[in-house]
Amino acid sequence: MTAKPVLVVASLVAGYEPDLPIVRNASLEVAAGEIVALLGPNGAGKSTLVKAVAGLVPIAGGIVRFEGRDITGRAAHRLIHEGLALVPQTENIFTKLTVGENLELAGHRVGRRLRERLAAVYALFPDLARQHRLAAGRLSGGQRQMLACARALVVEPRLLILDEPSAGLAPLMASQLFSKLAEVRAAGVTILMVEQNVRAALALADRAYLLVEGRERMSGPAATLAADPALAGLYLGTAA
Amino acid sequence: MLQLVADGLIQGAMVSLGAIGLTLTYSILRFANFTQGEFVTGGAYAALMALAGFAGMAQGPGKIGALSFGWPMLIALIIAMAATGTLALAIEWLLFARLRRHGSAITLVIASFGASLALRNLIAFAFGPQPQYFSRDLQIAIQPIPGLRVTPDQLFVLGLTSVAVVSLHIFLSRTTLGRAMRATSENPALAMLVGIDVRAVIRWTWLIGGALAAVAGIFLGLTVQLRPTMGFDLLLPLFAAAILGGIGSPYGAVLGGLLIGLAESLSVPFVGSEYRQAVGFLVMLAALLWRPQGLLGERG
């Protein structure tokens, strides 16, 4: 890892209840331009970790640094303006707003560049451009995930965090989404993604962390982890 | 018949305006705010105070056309909207914001009931229990259509309510703040993630709900009279309207308010005016049996 770290999580302790930490002393780093996958069994604390980074879950200990600045415990609505965007796993779009309203609301702070930014995300997700007047609740599952990503990308974040973007998607939709994410990275956005679909995640990612019981158990280049027989047997299922 | 419809629409307009605030605070904060009735009363008395202030200042106020009041009333309306919005904000800051950190929804409901009682008695103490009027002049009703008698003030109430409802629609659908309110009501956590300051949205919700309640109170004062219990007496129709329309839906509150007003008014020839409020509730119950989420409400 030669590029400077965009995100540094050090000894993070976090959970919804103060005396019941779900993330217990977890550390990870994401370098500029990387795609990093965060893997692990159910209940390992993957979602809680990324939500704590994004300011949605209280942090009890440890440090979160974004581009060198300490952002530990900063409110979620301020982080998006600093360049860090989270796409939650579920309920990640406003179903009662139209597709266009979702994107315009997300982009309300970019001011006069809004039109240019909307054009950019519509170019990446042409399906959404066609349906911009439709209530977002009427989109299909795959289109919802596309909208959720587009919504996060409107503000041109430098770090995009995705919580299980492929969950519940048909394999074809998931692979379409992953190829979009490769495009997003090619455009210069650093990506940290939680994934259950280990094989696909390791195929896309540069590096990966394995989180177990709130701590990182293993980390390394994606190819190395994908070939690790112990990992395959223990946590990834035979598919890996 | 035509007369009853007109009366019902006028009553319904006031219920609608008050119910919008009720449904907005419910949709953002998830609790039924009993203080909404006192925002109605507070708005009416705030306008009365503002008018008394003007009367001491200038020469005798002229009147606008055939209306019972002049320009000072319109200024008093704006002052009362601001004052009531501020009152709502103050109660949010003193009471609800603190309770939300620890309490459940039921704590907030009971606290709002307590605040309602306190405010009602405060108003009765300050202004006395006797009815008051913005103007003691008798207004001559006009007949825009044969068989329909309305006062110019009543037409003013209907007109300004329409303006308020259309403005609210444009606000919710076109402005960033309005969209942020809709977004926050659907999913506060996601609203934060897209950069919305949810606390600011909550403050605006109180301000707007309070201001619209003040308008309802002034209209009630214009067309009926001012009493310290005027808002509390309106509270049950407000709830009926908000629930009938689908609690959380501002358009539902408007529709529900008009339907409650019409149902109450149209039932008078059959059941007499003593039972008109009960008819409003029967309509609400029947509608809910047929459509439990309310007319324009969402499931779940």
Image (spheres, coloured by chain):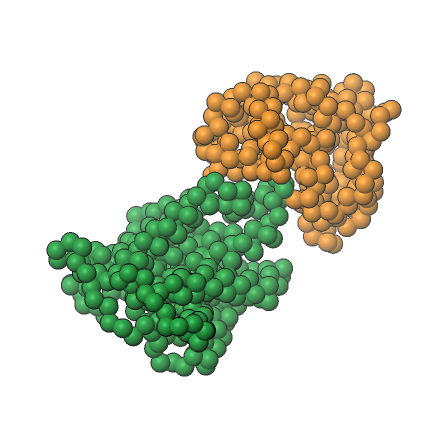
User: How far from the left and from the top, in percent, is residue A61?
Assistant: 80, 48
Q: Quadrant of residue A160?
A: top right
Question: Is residue A50 something one can see in this rendering?
Answer: no
Image position of B201 (left or right of B243): right
User: How far from the left and from the top, in percent, is residue A79?
Assistant: 70, 41
Position of the N terminus of chain B, as image quadrant, is bottom left
Chain A shown in which color?
Answer: orange
Q: Nearer the viewer, residue A23 or A130?
A: A130
Image position of A127 (left or right of A60): left
Q: Quadrant of residue B72?
A: bottom left
Residue depicted at x 47% and y 53%: B24
Residue depicted at x 21% and y 60%: B150
Question: Is residue B85 something one can see in this rendering?
Answer: yes
| Chain in green on the image | B
Image position of A91 (left or right of B150): right
User: Against B141, is A202 above or below?
Assistant: above
User: How far from the left and from the top, in percent, is residue B175?
Assistant: 50, 42
Q: Nearer the viewer, residue A40 or A166?
A: A166
Residue depicted at x 15% and y 63%: B269
